[in-house]
Amino acid sequence: MKRTPLVVTATVAGLAGVLAFHTSPSEIKLVPSAGTTSPEPGQSGQAGQSGQAGQGSTTAGKPARSPSPSSSSSSSSKPASSGTGGTRTVDGPSVNYSYGVLSVSVTLSGKKIVKVGIASLNDGSNFRSEMIDQQSIPILEQEAVQAQSSNIQSVSGASYTSEGFQTSLQAALRSVGLS
């Protein structure tokens, strides 16, 4: 009986502390392209190291592709090699999503999204981040094709990856006139 007031008080104090605790995710930022000489205000100079995307990064067991060094803008439009007149592939800008940097590649046939993939991914060889990416990115790719837009649901447990993916996808679609 003597412990009851102590247990109730501690429980109420702990519950109040948990309910009062608010976190805010860090801001998702676009990474400057290779042609940019200085980072945007508020970004560290290390954020622009997207050229190291192939070092130790994988997505679903595949090595990450680095953006071509000849592209000078943050998103590029290039025809796909399939030879179809209306098919083109667009790479979104590199996005720093707190646990790494990723860029989305979208293949379009006319105004229809045919395929969504990862153009580049660098998660710093962090094992946990690699595991999250391997599970969440295929789901995000499938959702983008089904939705035919960048309006997709986040994957539970991969909110930073989901937000970075969606930001790059939205910029890629916007660059070709789709939203």
Image: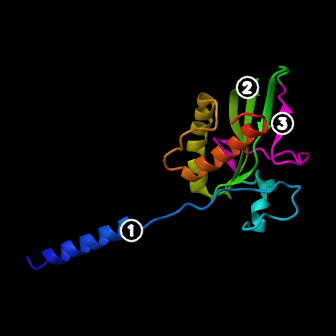
Q: Which mark is residue 20?
A: 1
* Residue drawn at (83%, 19%) of the image: 84
User: Local crowd at mark 2 within 10 Å, few (<14), some, or many (≥20)?
Assistant: some
What separation in Å lies between label 1 and label 2 (alpha carbons)?
Answer: 46 Å
Which amino acid does the dot numbered 3 rest on?
A: Ser
Q: Nearer the viewer, mark 3 or mark 1?
A: 1
Q: Main secondary structure of the magenta part?
A: loop
User: Helix, strand or loop at disc 1?
Assistant: helix
Say if the magenta span includes residue 18: no
What separation in Å lies between label 3 and label 2 (alpha carbons)?
Answer: 14 Å
Contact, mark 3 vs mark 1 (Cβ under 8 Å): no
Span of residues in magenta: 57-81
**Figure check: 173 above or below 113:** below
Which amino acid does the dot numbered 2 rest on?
A: Lys
**Figure check: 69 above or below 1:** above
- The picture places residue 78, in percent across and down from the top left corner, at 85, 34
- The picture places residue 58, in percent across and down from the top left corner, at 68, 47
Which amino acid does the dot numbered 1 rest on?
A: Ala
Q: Which mark is residue 77?
A: 3
The residue singled out by tag 2 in the image is 111
* Residue drawn at (86%, 45%) of the image: 68
- The picture places residue 154, in percent across and down from the top left corner, at 54, 44
User: Residue 40 occupies which quadrant of the picture?
Assistant: bottom right
User: Helix, strand or loop at disc 3?
Assistant: strand
Pick out the residue farthest to the right: 70
Assign the N terminus to one quadrant of the image: bottom left
Which label's residue is closer to the chain start, 3 or 2? 3
